[in-house]
Image (cartoon, grey):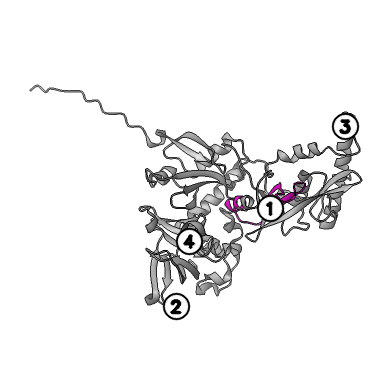
Amino acid sequence: MNFNTRRVTLPAITPLCLQKRVIKVYNEDNTSRAVEVPTDITARDICQLFVMKNHCIDDHSWTLFEHLSHLGIERTIEDHESVMEVLSGWGVDTDSRLYFRKNYAKYEFFNKPLDFFPDHMVSLSSETNGIMNHSQLIQTFLNSSTCPEIHGYLHAKEQGRKSWKKFYFVLRRSGLYFSNKGTSKEPRHLQFIAEFSDGDVYTLLSAKKIHGAPTDYGFCVKSTKRGSPRDLKLLCADDEQTRTCWVTAMRLFKYGLQLYQNFIQPHQKQKASPMRSISENSLVAMDFSGHKSRVIENPSEALSVAVEEGLSWRRKSCHRLSSHGSPSTSQSPMSNIALHMAQPWFHSKLSRDEAHRLITQQGLIDGVFLLRDSQSNPKTFVLSLCHTQRIKHFQILPVDDEGDLFYSLDDGHTRFTDLIQLVEFYQLNRGVLPCKLKHHCARITL
């Protein structure tokens, strides 16, 4: 018996990890860069890519954001998330973007959970008797059987209306509810609002202007399947701390242990391959004047040593200038300008509102800071600093001492020959500030 055989050629199948796609990523000044990436790339992979391309210091705070301009909302894309899955949820004609910038607050709740979850907003299980330390609090979030309950008042936008109404809300692992009878938590009084298996939590951009919210501390829950404005569950808190508590709790409820793994993964890699530590804990005042070096524990001694070191450095600088033909009696103003203009923490002609927005974008945690020109007094500078989720502004005044120029934050009591010395001192010492300088706001060009 004869059989007619025919050769069939099947199309080649490219493995998913080898497939490529071009995506566009933006930074704060809305400049962008297109890169070709594998289709299985995660948010952390993209951050690592841009850190290497731009020769940034990787302090694990670089973050990818999903920015939906047509809805006026934005969220952190978690490090483990598939970027292509995020892009697949975007409409064809919508103005949706990926932003690459720092977010120092991304995992800060693992370090200082009590700052993120005020006692009056958290109900704990009876097993803990209402008392626990910070590590126990985080464990209750990560343990699926003992999750704390978040509760408090929020403003909610009524469906199909422009008005907002205040309700008592309760957040549990099963979802978000509001009470239709005061602060009652009885099942018959709780109405379901949203759950997080198919939704994400976003912050509202310009909540009062775009959404008519009573405050600018707005956030929302958006379904991954529906993207129209009427499908958003719009909410609004009375202050930043309250909003941060709700948003952080929703992230923890949705991702649980995965967030903790995202948090510890970079630190585990760092232990495997030792690198220079950039932790704030590595910054200590040292005395090298004797035969052996020592750590200066006394803050007053550290202050006097820093001032003396600054004066010594200035005398050496003046000597170097005089040996090159520059006058040694006074510093060149242009040399001071050149010194601080090149620093990543200096943002020249940034306004007060722009500084506030930049710090808010990069994380409202203690010690986030930047320096800028003063808009009201051209001869001075301003230090903008975050403390207790509030942004404060401190004027840096020039001090003239017999023709020598210094800078000071405390009316001349502590003087510095340039802004670099000032920043380095307040990274080590709190001084007149509410906290030390820890994380500078940085902008990069992609």
Mark found first going from the N terminus, 3 or 1:
3
Which kind of residue does numbered mark 1 sit on? Ser
Q: Is residue 175 magenta?
A: no
Tell whether label 2 touches label 4 (CB within 8 Å).
Answer: no
Give the residue pinned by disc 1. 384
Give the residue pinned by disc 4. 212
Looking at the rendered structure, the secondary structure element under dot 4 is: loop
Mark found first going from the N terminus, 4 or 2:
2
Side of 6 where 274 appears, left or right: right
Give the residue pinned by disc 3. 326
Q: Give the mark toward the camera: 3 or 2.
A: 3
Residue depicted at 75% across the width and 50% down the height: 377
Magenta part of the protein: which range?
357-383
Which kind of residue does numbered mark 3 sit on? Ser
Q: In the drawing, what numbered circle is on residue 184?
A: 2
The crowd level at tag 3 (other Cα within 10 Å; few <14, some 14-19, many 20+) is some
Whether residue 429 is situated above or below residue 442 in the rendered picture: below
Looking at the rendered structure, the secondary structure element under dot 3 is: loop
Q: CA distance from mark 3 to mark 4?
A: 60 Å
